[in-house]
Image (cartoon, coloured by chain):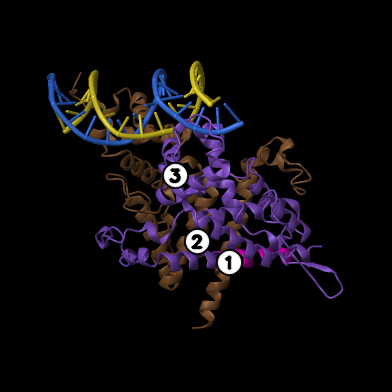
Chain colours: A purple, B brown, C yellow, D blue
DNA sequence: ACCTGAACACCGTTCAAGT
DNA sequence: ACCTGAACACCGTTCAAGT
């Protein structure tokens, strides 16, 4: 066949197929040869669009991060060329055309939920994603939006950095793997002599959705309460 | 050579070499053939000691979790056969020989720090470890100790489960990857037009130790403050 | 019981060749 | 520019053979 008149592949098509494969069968199932087969081309064809498998993975990760809503920070959530700019819902206009920024705890809460939802939809790729923004544009935009909003809200830059970090810790940790599903459903595992308090642990996996979401929400609200406390102490000193 | 009089390998030696390889060169560098070479044996030899590579990885993960201090919960931290039982430092004896359990926020704080330290020493294996306890004895002991302590402290079982989960989210998230090191040290990356607030981000990687630890400590204390608030509300209602 | 080499079905990546 | 098949140096795992 050699070169067709209209290209068989595109970066977008490759990224979408890769994500689908990772979601369905895990990170280990993504091989360049398998992916190529899925796309009905030969293995080496992919190298016309990505220099290495790592570069492809970077693109997959950034496409997932692109799904995170950043509008509460007054930023467009997606830098995809040609896409419409998002409305500035991070600031609400009052009757006089003035803008009020979303209070930072509310912005952080909404963002964290959207962040978790985007990642939890693709848990198998979270280990790659957690490596940080690196040179991935959507990940850098996310970091920029969070940091900028916190600084604008009055947090010192050093504190704002730490808050961005600890929020990422919590969200990526919660999306990396289900807590409840980590406990085998087989009651035989939990020998009372070895694990006296895990007698009911075999029931956890059956409720994984509610347990994981409950833990995330409890942790998120506790974290925000603790940060509000620190913010108030900050104000007292000035 | 065939079978030697004294075995060349043991599970312990294999696990130690595997962890060393993962720490030094990453999870991808661990191949059964490479590991065998490191141990001066041929590839298939490992299959006399572990049924699969996954089983070997499970053993590596559990050896890391075995390093986590659980003594603040009044539990031995390591179930290794033949090891001495840890002192019951989770309860402190007073002058009358009575035992007082460590207050749960203090126990949780000490445990979280030890947990993070153990994982942060081996970040490359955290994605595997975050899959949950499964059938790994040290991981099950850890879950048992945390849950038991919280329930004994008066937390309802459902809440205790969620707290165990959200603590794991935060600790694994913080150990999975450095926040600071995720930002390239190259100032060229942070185009002011695209990322208006990241003008100093290229300096982050240089301070990775202090930034990551500061974020962890801030998040941990905020989380504990938020949980104490909830614990007080719990007491009010009864 | 515990090691070996040979073998099988895979990998990521390079490269010359085709249009 | 974009695809192909052949090739290279790797994988995890099985298995018959050796002591």
Q: Nearer the viewer, residue B54 or B192?
A: B192
- In this picture, residue A168 sits left or right of residue B91: right
To which residue does mark 3 refer?
Answer: A27
Query: Going 52% across and 83% down the picture, which residue do you hit?
Result: B237
Could you tell me which chain the residue with mark 3 belongs to? A
Whether A224 is among the magenta residues is: yes
Asked which secondary structure carries label 3, the reply is helix
Which is closer to the viewer, label 3 or label 1? Answer: 3
Query: Going 69% across and 54% down the picture, which residue do you hit?
Result: A83
Q: Which residues are magenta?
A: A220-233
Q: Position of residue A193 (x, y in %)?
A: 26, 60
Query: Going 59% across and 51% down the picture, which residue do you hit?
Result: A65
Q: CA distance from mark 2 to mark 3?
A: 25 Å
User: Do the residues under discs 2 and 3 have CB atoms within 8 angstroms?
Assistant: no
To which residue does mark 1 refer?
Answer: A222
Residue B80 visible in image: yes
Instruction: Report whether mark 3 lies on the same chain as mark 1.
Output: yes
Which is closer to the viewer, label 2 or label 3? Answer: 3
Main secondary structure of the magenta stretch: helix
Give the position of the C terminus of chain A as an image quadrant. bottom right
- Circle 3 packing at 10 Å, graded few (<14), some (14-19), many (20+), is some
Q: Position of residue B63 (x, y in %)?
A: 37, 43
- Residue B166's tag is 2
The vertical placement of B183 against A193, above or below, is: above
Q: Position of residue B77 (x, y in %)?
A: 38, 51
Quadrant in which residue D7 is drawn: top left
Q: Furthest-bottom residue in view?
A: B238
- In this picture, residue B114 sits left or right of residue A105: left
Instruction: Report whether mark 2 lies on the same chain as mark 3.
Output: no
Asked which secondary structure carries label 1, the reply is helix
Could you tell me which chain the residue with mark 1 belongs to? A
């Amino acid at each position: 066949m050699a070169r067709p008149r209209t290209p068989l592949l595109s970066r977008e098509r490759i990224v979408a197929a890769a994500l689908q494969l990772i979601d369905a069968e895990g990170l280990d199932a993504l091989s360049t040869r398998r992916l190529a087969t899925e796309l009905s081309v030969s293995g080496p064809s992919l190298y016309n669009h990505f220099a290495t498998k790592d570069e492809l993975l970077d693109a997959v990760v950034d496409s997932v991060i692109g799904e995170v809503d950043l509008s509460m920070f007054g930023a467009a959530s997606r830098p995809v060329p040609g896409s419409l700019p998002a409305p500035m819902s991070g600031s609400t206009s009052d009757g006089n055309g003035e803008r009020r920024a979303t209070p930072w705890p509310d912005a952080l809460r909404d963002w964290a939920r959207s962040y978790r939802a985007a990642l939890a939809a693709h848990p198998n790729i979270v280990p790659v994603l957690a490596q940080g923004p690196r040179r991935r544009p959507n990940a850098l935009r996310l970091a920029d939006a969070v940091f900028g909003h916190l600084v604008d809200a009055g947090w010192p830059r050093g504190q704002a950095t730490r808050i961005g970090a600890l929020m990422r810790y919590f969200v990526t940790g919660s999306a990396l793997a289900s807590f409840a599903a980590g406990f085998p459903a087989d009651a035989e595992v939990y020998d009372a002599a070895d694990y006296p308090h895990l007698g009911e642990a075999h029931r956890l996996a059956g409720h994984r959705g509610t347990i994981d979401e409950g833990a995330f929400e409890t942790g998120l609200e506790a974290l925000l309460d603790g940060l509000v406390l620190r913010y108030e102490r900050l104000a007292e000193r000035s």
